[in-house]
Image (tube, rainbow, N blue to C red):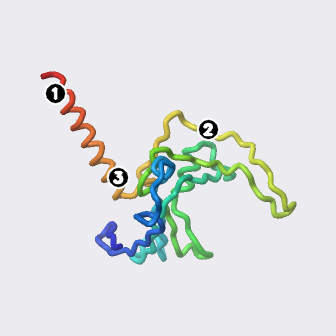
Amino acid sequence: QEASRGKKRAVKVRTVGVENSHVETCISELFQGNMRSSVSASAKSKNQSVTLQPFSCIHLDVQNRHVASIQDALELYFGAEYLGESNSSCRSVAIDRLPKILVLHLKRFAFSRSTQTMSKIRKVVKYPTELELKDYFLTARYKKELKVESGLQRSRKLDESESESE
């Protein structure tokens, strides 16, 4: 599957269980979305390896001292990750399709190499009553799809209100 991104460069996209290779169930319909993972040789590199795969849960690291809220953990998860000793490669993930119900798993256990034991992370993690997903959490293709859907919903509401007023 070919995809273009940014400055009209071709990127080979591998799909793992995204299209018709899995059985659709009521559980997958509610809880399954798609995640786009891309790795490039550098932040400005034209060569990318892109994988699109299903997910049913986002595992959030709360051990990091900069994480005080769900929003902080999401920013850490979706932020660019530099790989290798020289930080020459860059890995990033973005949501390509949200599930109807998004499950966030807080990783509350840490392994201590020195004692060879697990310990519970008892830190307070704040969470909002409404979750706001930042633009860079979503792929450009999915943002366009959401804008089209929200436009269609607005036009349906207008049609319904016009027919009620007649």
Q: Mark 3 = which residue?
A: 143
Q: Residue 150: give x, y in percent of width and height.
A: 30, 42
* Real-space CA distance between mark 2 and mark 3, rounded to the nearest whole angstrom: 27 Å
Q: Nearer the viewer, residue 42 or 102?
A: 102
Q: Which residue is mark 1?
A: 163
Residue most toward the left? 166
> x and y percent of residue 135 in the render?
41, 51
Identify the residue at image location x=84%, y=58%. Answer: 117
Question: Disc 2 designates what residue?
Answer: 126
Residue type marked 3: Lys
Q: CA distance from mark 3 to mark 1?
A: 30 Å
Q: Amino acid at mark 2?
A: Lys
**What residue is at 64 percent from the left and 48 percent from the top?**
106
Circle nearer the viewer, 2 or 3: 3
Q: Position of residue 138 (x, y in %)?
A: 42, 54
Residue mark closest to the camera, 3 vs 1 = 1
Which quadrant holds residue 83? bottom right
